[in-house]
């Protein structure tokens, strides 16, 4: 799966999780930039990503993510 | 089969435009409760539940009326993180007609909140308090092989829970909902853990048993989470990464299921459990179609895989009746044909005595179900309708949204399990009066009479997006044509049986007009559902030798469309008149008025009941129905002449 496809699918996932369709998904995007992206929503986001891409992340992998770019790399390394 | 539970497979799938519809809820003028409920009645995942709950909280904060939903205040006390669970509870409760307000104190404040009279929970005067505790909340110590210490440990845990309960009773007198504890999967010895006092498994077994007794004896309520976890599999239920990450006590995969179970418990407390089960017959109560397959042909025998599956449905219906659920029948059949298996089939477990209202006729099922509701004096929101046919389910759900209509899998093996999984008959207590209830309704039930048709059948038919395909007989369709001709009994005007070679002959005879008809709709392809053979009679006349149709597509105006197609071909063949015949058998009363309904005039009737009918092609105006028409494979006029 190439990065562009992952970004496209993430856009839909972000809409779903944050109930907000105007989020622009970029590699630099972090939790600070999005309203409602707290630690709990972060877990819900990770669970949704896991389900959508049929992958599993460890707790420590989730903890290490700095921004969306990291997430895409993690997904790409698995899917 | 785990997905039956994790995906709530008895509910219809969520619509594609779910998010847009949730947004639209906020602009509903006036009472929005029913709109919320109709969205909640789908199988929703965690994100969808979260969205719906958010919309409900917003609507409430804006002062919108949520009627006709019933208000309920539920306090949740937990030793784990319930932030993802709370929205799921709110949205799932809407499915059961309840506008839930959840009160929750800070994380892990169970004892403080329960025991302090003026605590947040006690001062909010909840209707019920849910103790969403996990085994890790209990003061358990291993005491391997030490029976006394083990008993003391169990007593300690029960004492702790009792103290919490007493605190709530004193502080707010709310109903308490206790959860049984899902045991961890990791064993110490292995199988010995179950037997040896003082192992974690042995302790939790003991606590669950005593907790059940405590709840049933005190008028409080039990939520059997241990059974739920065992049903879906303990290894999947306990999600260690999620516990490590944020103290989530079970896997997110089962939050929708858990939310539904809490909601059905709350609904049962508010008297919203269902009280009657309406059964379809053909391919639901038995395998096959009684009108076509006959008493010997339906599958209901023990030892036969298909028969066993349907017997399981009957067994479940009987068990439900024993606990007070009223049984009724709604079937598209001739009454006496539908009753025959109940009266004469030796393997049938259900007897006519068990059925409070028996509705077998050719009306649409929504009309019949309303008649049953009136006859039983029960609301539609108290009834469940079980039917293998997705079109019937869709019709009833659309016209009677208060009815519970479970989706069923293709395989009848899972019918009974799916019905049970849906939890329509959840009860928090059992009284001996319940045992008599089914009989009570039955005594009062007279045969329901049908007057008014339910509105909106046409609109529903249009929503099915049907495509009807007409073709002349061909080699590809031959086997199915022969099968239909030899099997159809009910919607069959002449019941003439033909062999394969005879059909091949008709296929090749240019003077004979033949039709094979297929129907597809949003639920899929129904395959070939009608067959017509017209043979040349007097000059300019077609005699309709054979006209049959599958009862599966009854009530969709297929026969009108077929007539239209026949008429379209009369012009090319120079036909001016159609002659039809109805030959009565003991199975085909259904089509007694077939030609009358299509605008034919009766020209004769003999003492056997055989009637002959005519329709002049000029001026014939067949009714049309909302479906796409495909007509293919017919010879053109020129080819006809050349041949």
Image (cartoon, coloured by chain):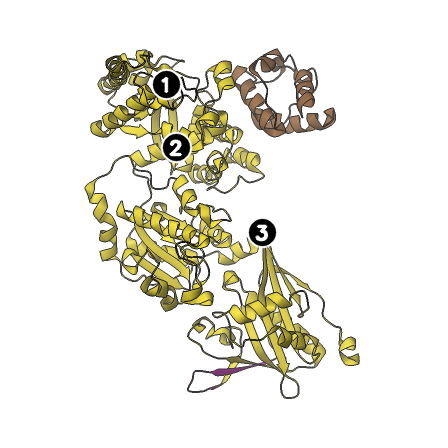
Chain colours: A brown, B yellow
Confirm whether circles 1 and 2 share one chain.
yes
Q: Which residue is mark 1?
A: B135
Kindly state the secondary structure of the residue where label 3 is placed: loop
Tell me the magenta residue range: B605-616
Which of discs 3 and 1 lies nearer the camera? The answer is 1
Residue drawn at (41%, 53%) of the image? B303
Which of discs 1 and 2 lies nearer the camera? The answer is 1
Q: Which residue is mark 2?
A: B261
Q: Nearer the viewer, residue B98 or B526?
A: B526
Q: Are marks 3 and 1 in contact (CB under 8 Å)?
A: no
Question: Does residue B183 appear in this view?
Answer: yes
For residue B47, above or below residue B170:
below
Q: Percent x, y for residue B615? A: 57, 80
Q: Which mark is residue B522?
A: 3
Q: Percent x, y for residue B599? A: 53, 76
Chain at tag 3? B
Q: Quadrant of the C terminus of chain B?
A: bottom right
Find the distance from the CA under tag 1 to the CA under tag 2.
19 Å
Estimate how packed mark 1 is, as few (under 14), some (14 to 19) or many (20 or more) residues with alpha carbons within 10 Å: some
Please report whichever mark, 1 or 2, sits nearer to the chain's N-terminal start. Answer: 1
């Amino acid at each position: 799966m190439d990065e562009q496809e992952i970004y496209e699918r993430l856009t839909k996932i972000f809409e779903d999780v944050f109930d907000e369709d105007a989020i622009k998904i970029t590699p630099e995007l972090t939790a600070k930039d999005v309203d409602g992206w707290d630690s709990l929503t972060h877990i819900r986001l990770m669970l949704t990503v896991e389900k959508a891409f049929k992958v599993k992340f460890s707790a420590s992998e989730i903890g290490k993510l700095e921004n969306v770019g990291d997430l895409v790399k993690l997904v790409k390394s698995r899917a | 089969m785990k997905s039956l539970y994790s995906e709530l497979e008895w509910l219809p799938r969520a619509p594609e435009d779910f998010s847009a519809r949730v947004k639209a809820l906020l602009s509903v003028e006036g009472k929005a409760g029913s709109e919320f409920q109709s969205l909640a009645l789908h199988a929703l995942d965690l994100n969808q539940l979260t969205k719906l709950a958010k919309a409900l909280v917003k609507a409430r904060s804006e002062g919108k009326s949520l009627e006709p939903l019933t208000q309920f205040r539920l306090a949740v006390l937990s030793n784990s993180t319930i932030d993802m669970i709370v929205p799921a509870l709110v949205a799932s409760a809407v499915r059961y007609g309840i506008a839930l307000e959840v009160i929750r104190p800070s994380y892990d404040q169970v004892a403080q909140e329960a025991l302090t009279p003026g605590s947040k929970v006690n001062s909010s005067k909840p209707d019920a308090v849910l103790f969403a505790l996990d085994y890790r909340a209990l003061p358990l110590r291993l005491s391997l092989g030490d029976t006394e210490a083990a008993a003391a440990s169990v007593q300690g845990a029960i004492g702790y829970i009792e103290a919490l309960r007493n605190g709530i009773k004193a502080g707010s007198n709310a109903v308490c909902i206790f959860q049984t504890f899902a045991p961890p999967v990791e064993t110490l010895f292995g199988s010995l853990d179950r037997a040896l006092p003082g192992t974690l498994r042995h302790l939790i077994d003991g606590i669950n048993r005593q907790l059940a007794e405590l709840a049933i004896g005190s008028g409080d309520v039990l939520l059997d989470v241990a059974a739920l976890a065992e049903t879906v599999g303990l290894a999947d239920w306990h999600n260690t990464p999620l516990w490590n990450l944020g103290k989530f006590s079970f896997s997110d995969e089962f939050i929708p299921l858990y939310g539904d179970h809490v909601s059905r418990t709350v609904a049962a407390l508010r008297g919203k459990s269902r009280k009657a089960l309406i059964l379809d017959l053909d391919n639901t109560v038995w395998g096959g179609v009684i009108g076509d397959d006959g008493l010997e042909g339906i599958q209901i025998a023990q030892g036969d895989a298909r028969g066993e599956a349907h017997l399981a449905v009957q067994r479940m219906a009987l068990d439900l009746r024993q606990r007070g659920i009223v049984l009724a029948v709604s079937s598209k059949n001739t009454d006496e044909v539908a009753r025959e298996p109940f009266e004469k089939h030796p393997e049938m477990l259900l007897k006519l005595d068990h059925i409070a209202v028996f509705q077998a006729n050719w009306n649409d099922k929504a009309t019949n179900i309303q008649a049953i509701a009136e006859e039983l004096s029960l609301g539609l929101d108290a009834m469940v309708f079980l039917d293998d046919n997705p079109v019937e389910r869709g019709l009833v759900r659309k016209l009677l949204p208060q009815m519970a209509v479970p989706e069923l899998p293709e395989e009848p093996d899972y019918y009974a399990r799916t019905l049970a999984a849906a939890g329509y008959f959840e009860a928090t207590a059992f009284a001996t009066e319940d045992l008599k209830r089914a009989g009570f309704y039955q005594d009062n039930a007279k045969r329901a009479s049908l007057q008014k048709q339910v509105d909106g059948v046409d609109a529903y038919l249009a929503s099915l997006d049907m495509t009807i395909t007409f073709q002349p007989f061909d080699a590809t369709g031959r086997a199915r044509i022969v099968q239909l001709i030899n099997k159809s009994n009910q919607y069959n005007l002449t019941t003439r049986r033909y062999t394969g070679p005879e059909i091949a002959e008709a296929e090749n005879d240019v003077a004979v007009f033949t039709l094979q008809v297929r129907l597809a709709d949003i639920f899929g392809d129904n395959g070939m559902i009608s067959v017509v053979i017209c043979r040349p009679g007097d000059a300019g006349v077609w005699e309709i030798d054979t006209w049959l149709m599958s009862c599966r597509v009854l009530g969709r105006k297929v026969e009108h469309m077929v007539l239209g197609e026949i008429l379209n071909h009369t012009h090319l063949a120079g036909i001016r008149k159609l002659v039809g015949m109805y030959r009565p058998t003991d199975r085909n009363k259904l089509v007694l008025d077939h030609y009358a309904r299509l605008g034919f005039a009766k020209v004769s009737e003999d003492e056997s009941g055989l009637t002959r009918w005519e329709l002049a092609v000029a001026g014939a105006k067949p009714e049309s129905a909302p479906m796409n028409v495909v007509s293919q494979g017919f010879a053109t006029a020129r080819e006809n002449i050349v041949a």
